Image (cartoon, rainbow, N blue to C red):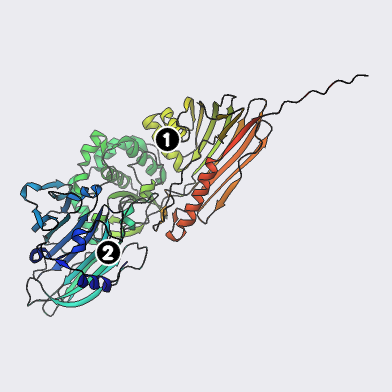
Amino acid sequence: MRSPSFALLMSSVLLLAPAASAEEWGEFTREELFATHFEEAPEASAVVLLDHRTVRIDEKFRLKLSHHRRTKIFGEAGTARAEVRIPYGDGEEIKDFRAHTVVPPDRQVKVEGKHVRDEKSGEGMVRIFTFPDVRPGVILEYSYELRSKRIDVLDPWFFENEDFTRQSRLDLQLPPGLSHRAFFGWSAEAPPKPITRGINDPKKPERKLIQTTWSMEDLPAYRAEPLTPNAADHRLTLYVQLQRYESTYEDFEIERSWAELGRLVAANWESAGNKTEEAKAWAGASVDGVRDPEGKARALYQRVRDGIRTEAPANVSVESVLPLGEVIRAEAGTPLAKNLILAQLLGAYGIEASVVLVATRDHGTFQPNWRTASQLNHAIVRVQLGTESVFLDASVSSCPFGVLPPNSMVAKGVALGQAGGEIVAVESRPVESARGVITSAELDGSGDLVVQSTWTVSGYPAFQARAEIVRDGALAHAERLIRARFPDATVESVGLSGESDEEGPLEVETTFRVAGYATKKGFDLACGAPFVFAGADNPLGTEERVVPVTFDYPWRSEETLTLRLPKGLYVPKPPAESGTRTREVSFSVRYDAKGSTLEGKRRFRIKEQVVEDSSVGQLQDLYGQLALADRAQFTVKRQPMRSSSPSSTH
């Protein structure tokens, strides 16, 4: 990254282009106007020249947020930046909006009313506008001011963009006496240090402000990485929380506690109603004769999980609640509605329960120091059974009692109680996840393969398989897994065992054929070992990666293979053995050739759910070795003909 001093030097050395409306927008350098690429990002189809936000609190303690962005378009793919979306919430308004396309050397095409529209989006609004005359070589520039009476929640600032960014900057302008807390989420390197100085209010020069600036330059394009539940978690993000104002004449709190935020969320849900009696009438038969608290909790959980169809994704906004009476009668509702009904039922039968707000893993990591409930998108239920807190999510059909689905397995959440919200640790009951496979295959002289494979899965693989089998059927489930390895396979039979025991192992027994599996090479055949659950690709690729890897859950897999060859064929040299381990992941592949039989064993294990960025390179190497092992080929040869001994003459 370039230093600020380098940027200042270049801006003073390069000739400026006055034709680009300097009075209204500021100058462009000739490089920005006429360059066909930038050395820092030679392949980029678009580069953000400037991304600048200013957050100012005015004399009436209202938010004035201004945003100014310039983007240079280099290639056809970059023209997709022509459409821009600016979200804003209820009670907020966009003022002083302006945008134009700069066509070098000196033409500007303004964004007019016909290019702009405002639409409803979720709980708020979004302004959508399209730049005119967009093609490689132009610069897209826009700015606006967002005004709001709410200052307790400030949107985070993302320094990185989907394109290479030359400069990203946030200015925080506050009156003296207004305190704040600023912190970064995950960062691959040291985040920028703040620079603070006194300034005059740009709108009222007689008013003094304290400005804090965070600025970075030459930021690579932000991109999603595989094996990352939410890529935005690893985007350099600055959170700012205003806290308290103190002066000679007045003082007041701005930052809300989680207790207060919890009470506000619960109040928003009151429109759903307390339907305890109606829920008891609907679910009461499920607990008849059940005396112990866990047995009752288990029965009620299963009744809500299976008796109410889940509709829509996770969402805890007031619109997603729905009147609970309607949900019970229709036996269909949102995840939030289902878990609210479950909490009410548990309480009605004397079991202590509370709703817990969480941010699912695909939504983003919960930031307790950023005081807004909007970062929490899902609700689960905490049940107190003796000294154990058991967490439940009735919205996912595949999960047994006490086991959270992977997307809800997060570190912390906000439990709602009579006192409001309280941050709590979230834990799922331990689950041993495994897959054991026994594969018996026969290869005929023409290269066709007939396979019998039985796999037994437990823990999360079993929960997920059962849900898929219920949804799509056993044949579709088996075909998806088998054809991931053998795209041309014909599945002839599928048998199940243990499908009705939701907490036990599930066994899937299959028979399938693969025509032309082995390739003929003269009198010989060439093929790879037909492990059903081998993979040929490295999921992490080979490009340098700076963000951690997060697996769904720890688990292990072992597949035993027996490959029988026709009489007269043998494997002179089996594939080489392979294996390696890191602290988090390990694998091994072993073979043994015995006459017309090849035996193999493939093991893979994920011991730790998270692989930190410092160890990702080792994991990439491991996956690379595993991919080579899974692609390894061997030759099947014919036994040499034995020559008969000449007869002796006496």
Q: How many numbered marks, from 0 up?
A: 2
Q: Quadrant of the C terminus?
A: top right
Q: Nearer the viewer, mark 1 or mark 2?
A: 2
Mark 1 or mark 2, earlier in chain: 2
Element carrying mark 2? strand
> Can residue 299 be seen in this snapshot?
yes
Residue drawn at (61%, 39%) of the image:
600
Residue 155 % position (x, y): 21, 60
Element carrying mark 1? helix
> On the image, numbered disc 1 is attached to which residue?
466
Residue 491 % position (x, y): 47, 26
- Residue type marked 1: Arg
Q: Quadrant of residue 291?
A: top left
Residue drawn at (35%, 68%) of the image:
190
What crowding class fits label 1: few (fewer than 14 Cα within 10 Å), some (14-19), or many (20 or more)? Answer: many
Q: Nearer the viewer, residue 334 or 640?
A: 640
Q: Are marks 1 and 2 in contact (CB under 8 Å)?
A: no
- Residue type marked 2: Leu
Q: Quadrant of residue 33?
A: bottom left
The label on residue 238 is 2
Real-space CA distance between mark 1 and mark 2, rounded to the nearest whole angstrom:
42 Å
Residue 384 % position (x, y): 37, 52
Q: Quadrant of the N terminus?
A: bottom left
